[in-house]
Each structure stands twice: as structure tokens, then as C-alpha cells.
């Protein structure tokens, strides 16, 4: 099970869709793949070591994280402590963004880790704008915090996107048991107790949130149950 960031709950008010879209408009498009992965529930240590080999045609396989020491160094890679490795469904939107990220990751710099592990920088999916390996702390300080302040949402932390993902997913009808798997938790307790802070106004955005995430994010049964008209259109029913 993933350890939640030790952030105060007051910084975790979920995004309404217009707020999220304003944030994207403010942030350099180079980091839009990072933003999308944050929205799908990934945390900083997972983003830093997401390798290209973990991205398949139909899913993103979260397999490892990086453990930093107090000085901020990268001492070692370790397997993610999940009940089962998380697999995020690959939507058309996600595939396009990850192709963008992969094409930017071309550095031949060698990154050394504890235990004699050496990997080329271009093996990893995400980079900073200058081509260096993605650094979550730097991204948060120089990209996220600056954009959040610019759109008037001071104090909102990146981890709130994980909470947003849960609320958006529940709103459009994702089965709670499947959501638990997507989040990498063992039971529904975390979804119910930690991520269960509904924000007024979300219900009015349900159709637009589905448009943003894409119908292909939902399983067919979820689409049929929550959006029957759109299901019939997709299946070409009269």
C-alpha cells in the first residue's frame, strides 16, 4: 500500500474541471504528461522512475519508486510496496501525452543508483524541460507552485490531484472495487475515509469530466450504467 504524503487536509480540496483546465493553460505543455499522470493518482517517487518499458499499449504498469535520502540524493530504486502492482488503463488521451513525453526523453546520461545499478536517462519516460531526468521536488517548486499561485489557488499541493482523480472517477461511475485497484490500495477503506471529500459543483461537471478523461477510461458496463445514452451511441444501438 502506498504511503500518503503527509500534507494537511486543508490543502487537498479537489479541483473543479475549470480550475484544472486553467492550471494546464498556465503550465508549460512539456509538463502536461506529468500533470495527467498526477491526475491519475501517481505520486512523485513513481513519476521519477516511470520507465518507458512500463508503458504498454493498453496500460501503464507502476513497478518501482525512488527512495531519497535527507539530502535529496537518489540512493536506490526499490519495488513499489503495493498489494498488487498498479495498472492504469491507457486511454487515447493518455497515449498521446505519453508519446509526447517519450519523444522528449533522449538523453544518454547514465544515472547511477545504490547497488551498482546504472540506467541511461532515456530509459525513463519523464524529463525536465532542459532534458534532465524528472525531479519531482524541482517540478513542484518551479512549475506547480508558481502556476497554482498565478491562478489564485495558493496552498494547493500536487497530491490533491490524486484526491481529484478519486472524486472524478466515482462521479462518472467507476466501480469502487476497480478504483481501489487503480489506486494501489488493498481495501475500499482508503477510498471512503481519505479521499471521500466531495466538493460542491462537481455533479454539474459530470458530462464534461467524462469528455476530459475520455469514454475509453470507463469499462463498458460502467458506461452503460452511468451514461446509458452515450453507451447506446458508442455501441451504435438505435
Image (tube, grey):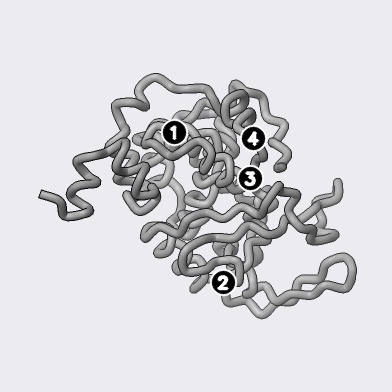
Labels 2, 1: front one: 1
Measure the C-alpha gap from mark 4 to mark 1.
15 Å
Measure the C-alpha gap from mark 2 to mark 4.
36 Å
The residue pinned by badge 1 equals 170
Binning the other alpha carbons within 10 Å of mark 3 as few (below 14), some (14 to 19) or many (20 upward) gives many
Residue 155 in view here: no
Where residue 9 sits, quadrant-wise, is top right
The residue pinned by badge 3 equals 184
The residue pinned by badge 4 equals 187
Binning the other alpha carbons within 10 Å of mark 1 as few (below 14), some (14 to 19) or many (20 upward) gives some
The residue under the point 38% across, 47% down is: 218
Measure the C-alpha gap from mark 3 to mark 4.
9 Å
Q: Position of residue 238 (x, y in %)?
A: 10, 49
Measure the C-alpha gap from mark 2 to mark 1.
34 Å
The residue under the point 43% across, 63% down is: 95
Image quarter hosting the N terminus: top right
The residue pinned by badge 2 equals 105
Q: Is residue 91 left or right of residue 234?
A: right
Labels 4, 1: front one: 4
Residue 52 in view here: yes
Amino acid at each position: 500500500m502506498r504511503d500518503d504524503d503527509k500534507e494537511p487536509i486543508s490543502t487537498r480540496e479537489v479541483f473543479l474541471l475549470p480550475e484544472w483546465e486553467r492550471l494546464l493553460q498556465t503550465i508549460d505543455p512539456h509538463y502536461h504528461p506529468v500533470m495527467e499522470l498526477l491526475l491519475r493518482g501517481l505520486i512523485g517517487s513513481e513519476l521519477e522512475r516511470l520507465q518507458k518499458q512500463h508503458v504498454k499499449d493498453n496500460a501503464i504498469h507502476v513497478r518501482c519508486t525512488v527512495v531519497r535520502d535527507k539530502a535529496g540524493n537518489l540512493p536506490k530504486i526499490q519495488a513499489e510496496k503495493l498489494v498488487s502492482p498498479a495498472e492504469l488503463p491507457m486511454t487515447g488521451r493518455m497515449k498521446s501525452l505519453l508519446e509526447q513525453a517519450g519523444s522528449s526523453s533522449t538523453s544518454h546520461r547514465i544515472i547511477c543508483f545504490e547497488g551498482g545499478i546504472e540506467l541511461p536517462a532515456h530509459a525513463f519516460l519523464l524529463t525536465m524541460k532542459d532534458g534532465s531526468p524528472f525531479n519531482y521536488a524541482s517540478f513542484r517548486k518551479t512549475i506547480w507552485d508558481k502556476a497554482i499561485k498565478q491562478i489564485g489557488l495558493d496552498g494547493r499541493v500536487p497530491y490533491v490531484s490524486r484526491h481529484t482523480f478519486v472524486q472524478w472517477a466515482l462521479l462518472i461511475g467507476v466501480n469502487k472495487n476497480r478504483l481501489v485497484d487503480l489506486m494501489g490500495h488493498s481495501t475500499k477503506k482508503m477510498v471512503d475515509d481519505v479521499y471521500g471529500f466531495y466538493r460542491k459543483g462537481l455533479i454539474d461537471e459530470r458530462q464534461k469530466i467524462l469528455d476530459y478523461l475520455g469514454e475509453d477510461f470507463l469499462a463498458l458496463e460502467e458506461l452503460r450504467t452511468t451514461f446509458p445514452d452515450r453507451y447506446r451511441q458508442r455501441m451504435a444501438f438505435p
